[in-house]
Amino acid sequence: MIYINQVLQSVKDSTRIRIIEIEESYVYIVNIDANTSMPQKELYSTLVTDVEQKEWLIITDPFARVIAEEDLTEVQIQKRDKDWEIIQTYCLEHMSSLLQKNGRETKIKEIAVELNVTSTKVKKLLSRYWQRGMNKNAMLPDYANSGGRGKTKKLTNEKIGRPRRVTVNGEYRSGINITDEIKIQFESAINKYYRKANNYSLKDVYYFILRDFYSDRYKENGELQYRIWESNKIPSYHQFYYWFKKFEDPKRDIAFRKSVKEYELKHRPILSNSKVETNGPGTRFQIDATIADIYLVSSFDVNRIIGRPVIYAIIDVYSRIVTGIYVGLEGPSWLGAMMALDNMVADKVEFCKQYDIEIIEEQWPTHHLPEIIIADRGEFEGYAVEGLINNLNIKIENTTAYRGDLKGIVERQFRTINGKVKQKAPGAIQKEYRERGDRDYRLDAMLNLKEFTALVITLILQHNHKIIDKYPMEKEMITDGIVPTPLNLWNWGIENRKGRLRTIDRDILRLNVLPRGRATISRAGIKFKNLLYGSKRAIEEQWYVKLKNKSIDIVYDPRHLDKIYIPNENGMDYEICILLEPSQQYKLDFLEDVVFQHQLRNELEEEERAKQVQLTINTDTVIEQIIKTAEKKKKQVQHQPTSKKEKLAAIRDNKAIEKVANREEEKFDLTPTGVGQPAEIIDFTSRMKLEQQPEKKSSSRLMEKLKRKRDEQFGKDE
């Protein structure tokens, strides 16, 4: 939604505009930074869309100031009131005409004639009125901008500034003044050459300025050449450097010459630390993933290399203790993050026991929920995090792209783990590029996933007892004799700062972090991803009859589709649904496999449907041909002088005749092929062959009708 008198700024070029009128589906705007600006007409819907898409940003009105009347001079008040009177008396009543492009110049000339001033004067007054907020104080003169402090001096024919001391052949050369035109040349060259990835130096840019603007061009041997003007006609490098420093924008320059990532990571001001916004353990956890610098082997066959694992780690910002990890082959993705979140609330004693590492709870006491999780945009921007936000009251803070420094604590831990892995573990990546003859380090891989996880756990246990360099210690910590190790800081923070620690049942967390979907209830069962499920509750409450075609929310594990879960309204428990018999063939498949199978089936059917379109067209054509042939035959038959009543009355007899004819044609004859002689007839008494009797002519009335019917069918005369 946009409103009259609102100020917007373009993200693309920083242009600032004011909305001065809204009429039905159109909006009128002026550029508030131009010397004079007449209204432009834009579609209201287009501007609203641009605002919603953040191409235009709503900003604070730069001219909205509280100005006390007693602070104004007599001259300021007189000039303001005089110009305001002109706007009220001569312009406001014609505002509808002044907004329109057609006829605006004519109306401005009419007002100028009435006032006995130039059209330019009227345009300046209108521009000031529109640009500065359309109120009385908008007409105040800009005396506040008067004076010379820090301002560019007005130029004369004489050169200002320090005189040059360069002489050539005894001739004194004074150089040139830097005019607005030359400043534009400087700024254009800086944007064109300096703020590019070519990394031209300032000297290079200065030479490009001389070549482009202060040289004669000619061709020599077909090639374009440049002859630089004499030194008293060109700006000096010192002049260019002076104005470059005025135009300089370090953030912008580094972003253009290197990248925004380079600036944010290496050149931005560091005015704070991660701990500032935390007030105890559990306030903020950082989560991130990295691909470990090591190749692993299969747990089934050590000769099979399975690639590099993914490590997810969650670290408490206040104490630097690791609160959850995942080492596996999922990710970086929500599945990997989900596993790390599950480990975050797990009992670490039991977790370590799975990897044959015996610890006591005091060595790794974390199994809590935080108040805030700082994460990357990828995994924590989808619908899967809604359960964390809405049900568990965990706030998610997503960092901007390529800003690993915003999660510096967990990033530092990854560097430590990868550094130790490279020192000790076989199969680790030793350098980015191997030279010819170097042994392929992948062939040295010998750790499987479980063994590497045990290695990572060992490093984390060491980290929890390790002194943190440059930790911002509090006075109370020093007084209490706290050595800044993660475990000490965690325990001290719980006792003295309380933090935001909460615990939760692990199944409830899983219920909230598992991906969500929509299933449909039908007579065949609960349908999800074209798989059919059933549950005890659904049968008892007759869902398949009462709730047919209703969709419901479910949660599922993409790696384990033999069950899905329907969360109850209280958010604390759920109904388990198991695969029905028609879908049992997918019991051991991952979600990706199921989706692929159905996509493949749809593609095959779609391909076949394309063929069936042609088949349908051909079938229709044949049917039409058969009907046309029948119509033609009927027209060729001589019409019998039979009434409609007689025709209808003969249907039964006609059907009987047709049945006899069909039986004659449809009867089975099992005589072997090639046997054309009629069978011999033997008298069993005398064993003598009987003469074959001539076929008797049938006198059946039915057969007569049949013959007549057939003759009529083929158009024969009786």
Image (cartoon, rainbow, N blue to C red):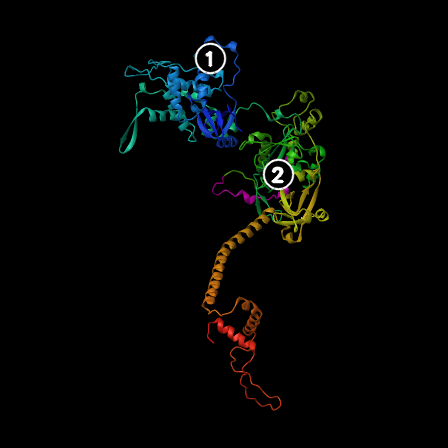
Quadrant in which residue 407 is drawn: top right
**N-terminal label among 2 and 1:** 1
Kind of residue at badge 1: Asp
Residue 80, x across and y down, in percent: 46, 13
Give the camera-side residue of 115 and 64: 115
Residue occupying the far right of the picture: 540
**Camera-nearest residue between 548 and 148:** 548
Is residue 35 toward the left or the right of residue 652 in the image? Answer: left
Q: Is residue 297 visible?
A: yes
In this view, 585 is above or below 209 = below
The residue at which mark 1 appears reads as 81
Answer left or right for 349 relative to 332.
Answer: right
Residue 313 quadrant: top right
Image quarter of the N terminus: top right
Q: Residues within 10 Å of mark 2 (few under 14, many from 20)?
A: many
Which stretch appears magenta? 433-459
Left of 30 or right of it: where is 542? Answer: right
Residue at image mark 2:
384
User: Residue placed farthest to the left in the image?
Assistant: 221
| Disc assigned to residue 201 | none
Q: Which structural element holds mark 1? A: helix
**Considering only vertical position in the picture, is 580 above or below 514?**
below
Q: Is residue 352 visible?
A: no
Is residue 444 within the magenta segment? yes
Mark 2 is on which residue type? Answer: Ala
Between 228 and 447, the one lying in front of the other is 228
